[in-house]
Image: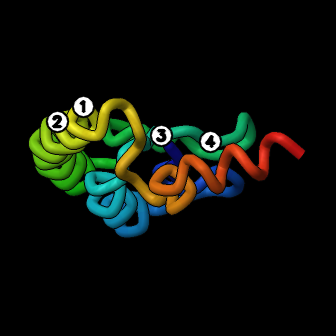
Amino acid sequence: MVGPDICGFGGDTNEELCARWYQLASVYPFARSHNDYWSIPQEPYSLGMDVMRSAGESLKLRYVFLKQYYSLWMLTKGITPFFSSMAYYPLAMADITDT
């Protein structure tokens, strides 16, 4: 599973960009807010009420999606349903890893 650093990693973000990142991150199977030491804080509460509102709505939606993601994961017997075409071809994967 992969996902981006919400609001970006290097450099400073702004309110609009960070709010949009939270909206996008709600559909990723893995997402985290993470930045470098030299950038401004980018937690929703540090960027203002608009970002707080957007992040809150997006995170609520994310938890709805996560139930579906994990249900699908269990139905596929642990093979990830996300973004990996190799997961659907285990014999091809075995050929690659055996060499």
Is residue 37 toward the left or the right of residue 65 in the image?
A: right
- Amino acid type at circle 3 is Ser
As measured in the structure, the alpha-carbon distance from the residue carrying label 2 to the one carrying label 4 is 31 Å
Q: Is residue 38 left or right of residue 21?
A: right
* Above or below 84: residue 30: above
* Disc 1 and disc 2 in contact, CB within 8 angstroms: yes
* Disc 4 residue crowd, few under 14, some 14–19, many 20+, Cα 10 Å: many
Residue contact at pointers 4 and 3, CB within 8 angstroms: yes
Whether pointer 3 and pointer 1 mark residues with C-beta atoms closer than 8 Å, the reply is no
Q: CA distance from mark 1 to mark 2?
A: 5 Å
Q: Residue 70: where, in percent of width, then height?
A: 23, 34
Q: Residues within 10 Å of mark 1 (few under 14, many from 20)?
A: few
Residue sitting at 19 percent across and 55 percent down?
Answer: 54
For the image, the number of numbered tags is 4
The local secondary structure at tag 2 comes to helix
Q: Secondary structure at mark 1?
A: helix
Q: Amino acid at mark 2?
A: Ser
Query: According to the image, label 2 marks what residue?
Result: 71
Residue 43 vs 14, above or below: the answer is above
Q: Nearer the viewer, mark 4 or mark 1?
A: 1
Q: Spatial distance from mark 2 to mark 3, Cα to Cα?
A: 25 Å
